[in-house]
Image (cartoon, rainbow, N blue to C red):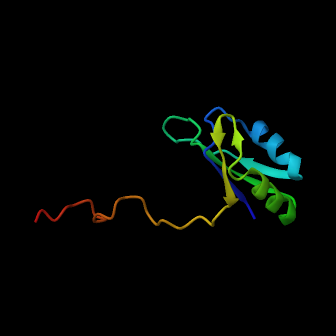
Amino acid sequence: MSIYVGNLSYDVTDSDLTSVFAEYGSVKRVQLPTDRETGRMRGFGFVEMSADAEETAAIEALDGAQWMGRDLKVNKAKPREDRGNSFGGGRRDGFSRGY
């Protein structure tokens, strides 16, 4: 299981998030996605912990808690949906129909 952590400050680091979640158990991994174009953090992240009970305790304690001036949104991460291609649904040959 992975934990979704939303409404994060753009200044948060992996070690900041690790230290907060370490209060509830052993943190295996922290991911903080960044914007491809700007390199800036996107305001959310994912945390994996060693045991489901630790993750549940962290979710219950931290969801809605204020941290770094923000109200955190913490819940079980949902599996990533396959969004197919990202080309907007046009024709694959590059031509438009011109109706």
Comparing 5 with 27, the one in front is 5
In this picture, residue 53 sits left or right of residue 79: right
Task: Please identify the quarter of the rendering in which residue 18 is found.
Answer: top right
Residue 9 is left or right of residue 14, and the answer is left
Tell me residue 62's x, y (percent): 75, 50
Lateral position of residue 65 relative to residue 6, left or right: right
Question: Residue at horizontal 56%, vertical 42%?
Answer: 42
Decide which of 13, 72 is in the foreground and name it.
Answer: 72
Return the residue found at the far top: 11
Expressed as whole percent of the image width and height from the top left, the position of residue 15 reads 79, 37
Task: State the residue in front, 23 or 64.
Answer: 64
Point 59% across, 38% down: residue: 41
Answer above or below: position of 24 versus 98.
Answer: above
x and y, in percent, of residue 75 in the image? 68, 59
Task: Between residue 73 and residue 5, name the one nearer to us.
Answer: 73
Question: Total of numbered circles in the picture?
Answer: 0
